[in-house]
Amino acid sequence: MPKEKGVSRFVDEVDIYVRSGDGGPGAVSFRREKYVPKGGPDGGDGGGGGDVIFRVSGEIKTLSFLLMKKHFRARNGQPGSGRNKTGSKGRDCVIEVPPGTVISSRDTGVVLSDLTGENRETIILRGGKGGYGNARFATSVNRAPRFAQPGKPGRSLNLTLQIKTIADVGLVGFPNAGKSTLLSVLTDARPKIGQYPFTTISPNLGVMEYGNELQVIIADVPGLLEGAHKGHGLGIKFLKHIERTKVLILLIDLSVGDFAAQHKSLRNELERYSTGLVTKPYLTVGTKQDIVSTEAARRFLDSSIQGKKLCISSIARTGIGELKDEIMLLMEMSCEKQLS
């Protein structure tokens, strides 16, 4: 499978067709040896067809390479031959995909495999079994069978592949809430940053170090719009990337005002997409403290928004240390929740 070179277009969903190899036919053959005029059957079995295998590769970040080639087929098994020789197995079709790829049947919607870090490889389709050669059918009644089995045919599937980003923390907010800037401050990531909607059009991941020992993966995903659960804006393409996160950071733009309305809208979109998202531990963070008055920041902290609140400025680096502490507390809370 070719590796990506340079910067690739981010594609997080694609449909493909796969087929496993047919089993090879068994052989009809008889021993032909000197001084043995009537040798017995020695037809070997056919080889099994190749499997369709998906394997995780850390070098691949997008499914864009599947846009040009959407049909994949494993090789057929080879026929058996005389002297009880079994045909060779067909070559497997190995498709490398990014970590976090979910493989589903396009026809039924059933999830067939979820390739997280713990599950690095999966066989989606087994190849057809090779047919038995005539040596298998010799009996006391029929010592010279002149027939063999054909190989079993391979199987095919129409598949949908989706990437669901694997991260510990998800940054959630409306466009221009400061997610990308905050990610660059908290981690080693260098996302594209700009003052216009959808600067981020694909997930960015960064690693936050804490205490020189612990590392937390943080995801900055495209800005959320009202109606995202219905697909508005980048909609579901955004929301599916935070399903795996352990905790959420809800970002409220202090320069916009109407803090409670921003918070309510974010929570509503999360809940309408998946009730599991609103049960995750979360922290509400007011951003851009450097460009608002002290009174505005105080109004946010005193607002009716439930749960803990914190004000920060990514540009001035204000409150970043405290935010890191709170993130680690949320991670501990998430671990305790999973154990209970």
Image (cartoon, rainbow, N blue to C red):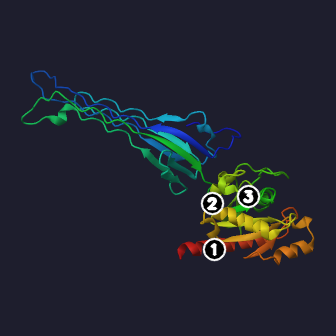
Looking at the image, do the residues carrying marks 3 and 1 touch, with CB atoms under 8 Å apart? Answer: no
Residue 257: x and y, percent? Answer: 86, 67
Q: Mark 1 against mark 2, which lies toward the viewer?
A: 2
**Local crowd size for mark 3, using a 10 Å CA cut-off: few (<14), some (14–19), many (≥20):** some
User: Seen from this angle, which residue lies furthest bottom?
Assistant: 302
At a point 87% along the width and 72% down the height, the residue shown is: 297
Residue 178: x and y, percent? Answer: 81, 59
Query: Badge 2 is on which residue?
Result: 273
Q: In this view, does 87 lie above or below 219?
A: above
Residue 168 shows up from this direction: no
Q: Residue 131 sits in which quadrant?
A: top left
From mark 3 to mark 2, how far is it between C-alphas?
12 Å
Q: In which quarter of the image is the N terminus?
A: top right
Query: Badge 3 is on which residue?
Result: 226
Query: Badge 1 is on which residue?
Result: 332
What amino acid is at disc 3?
Glu
User: Seen from this angle, which residue lies furthest right?
Assistant: 293
Residue 315: x and y, percent? Answer: 87, 61
At a point 71% along the width and 55% down the height, the residue shown is: 221
Does 152 sit left or right of 197 as displayed? Answer: left
Q: Residue 292 sits in which quadrant?
A: bottom right
From mark 3 to mark 1, how far is it between C-alphas?
31 Å
From mark 1 to mark 2, how far is it between C-alphas?
25 Å
Residue 239 shows up from this direction: yes
Between 175 and 144, the residue placed more toward the observer is 175
